[in-house]
Amino acid sequence: KAGVTQTPRYLIKTRGQQVTLSCSPISGHRSVSWYQQTPGQGLQFLFEYFSETQRNKGNFPGRFSGRQFSNSRSEMNVSTLELGDSALYLCASGRTSGRLGETQYFGPGTRLLVL
Amino acid sequence: KQEVTQIPAALSVPEGENLVLNCSFTDSAIYNLQWFRQDPGKGLTSLLLIQSSQREQTSGRLNASLDKSSGRSTLYIAASQPGDSATYLCAVRYSSASKIIFGSGTRLSIRP
């Protein structure tokens, strides 16, 4: 069974630009969560989608948005990029949305560098 | 405020030793707790998931325990190997619909 895939793996952008990251969950999984990882702040939750609906949202500005499609693939968009947005963005998938306390499976991440 | 803390931030031990990694959380009303490992530049790999009703979980050389009353979890690694070198993160979920809160991790180095 293929794991969680994220594209692109590496990305370089300049301040003010916008970026879209993609995540394909494990086949059959309907929950997708996004996280930002930086050396200073560690792993921080961005948002979670389940069946195309946003279920949870972290404390990030409105420049960060996401969506989930009917095939459970998810995209994350960051507009008006700032230097501080440079980070590893991780996506995780699960069969349900936390019910039954299931395990989350993480993708390899997209490393974004903002210049 | 719900927080997850991992101490120490880094740990180096010789190969073959048994070791314990610590995780503490401020609110004891957790839903579940999960331990992950992360290799440099890579995503996270789930190691063990403990439900709030459980006290421990085991997988191979790994054993994770949960003590909600004291707000602590430990990850025990037996007979450590150089391949165990990685950052270990614990993550707490407080309800089935809530976000996961991660600790800052313990960077483990096993010396051959």
Image (tube, coloured by chain):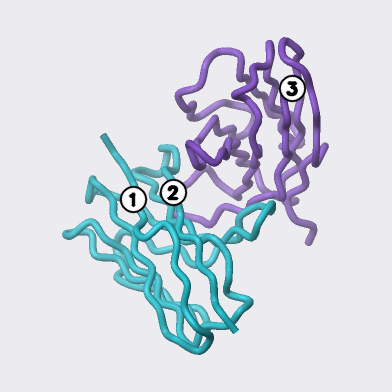
Chain colours: A purple, B cyan
Q: Which mark is residue B5?
A: 1
- Amino acid identity at mark 2: Ser
Which element is circle 3 on? Answer: loop
Q: Is residue A84 left or right of residue A100?
A: right
- Amino acid identity at mark 1: Thr
- Give how far across and how far down residue B76 sits, in percent: 40, 76
Q: Chain of mark 1?
A: B
Picture quarter containing residue B94? Answer: top left
Q: What's the CA distance linking mark 3 and mark 2?
A: 26 Å
- Give how far across and how far down residue B77 sits, in percent: 45, 79
Q: Is residue A6 left or right of residue A50?
A: right
Identity of the residue drawn at 52% across and 15% down: A61
Query: Is the C-beta separation of discs 3 and 2 under 8 Å?
Result: no
- Give how far across and how far down residue A27 sits, in percent: 75, 51
Quadrant assignment for the C terminus of chain A: top right
Q: Chain of mark 2?
A: B
Identity of the residue drawn at 62% across and 39% down: A32
Q: Which residue is mark 3?
A: A115
Query: Is the C-beta separation of discs 1 and 2 under 8 Å?
Result: yes
Foreground of the two, B40 or A27 = B40
Identity of the residue drawn at 57% across and 52% down: A104
Q: Which residue is mark 2?
A: B104
Query: Is the C-beta separation of discs 3 and 1 under 8 Å?
Result: no
Q: Is residue A59 left or right of residue A62?
A: left
- Give how far across and how far down residue B70 sits, in percent: 18, 60
Tell how many labels: 3
- Amino acid identity at mark 3: Leu
> Mark 3 packing: few (<14 Cα in 10 Å), some, or many (20+)?
some
Foreground of the two, A13 or B2 = A13
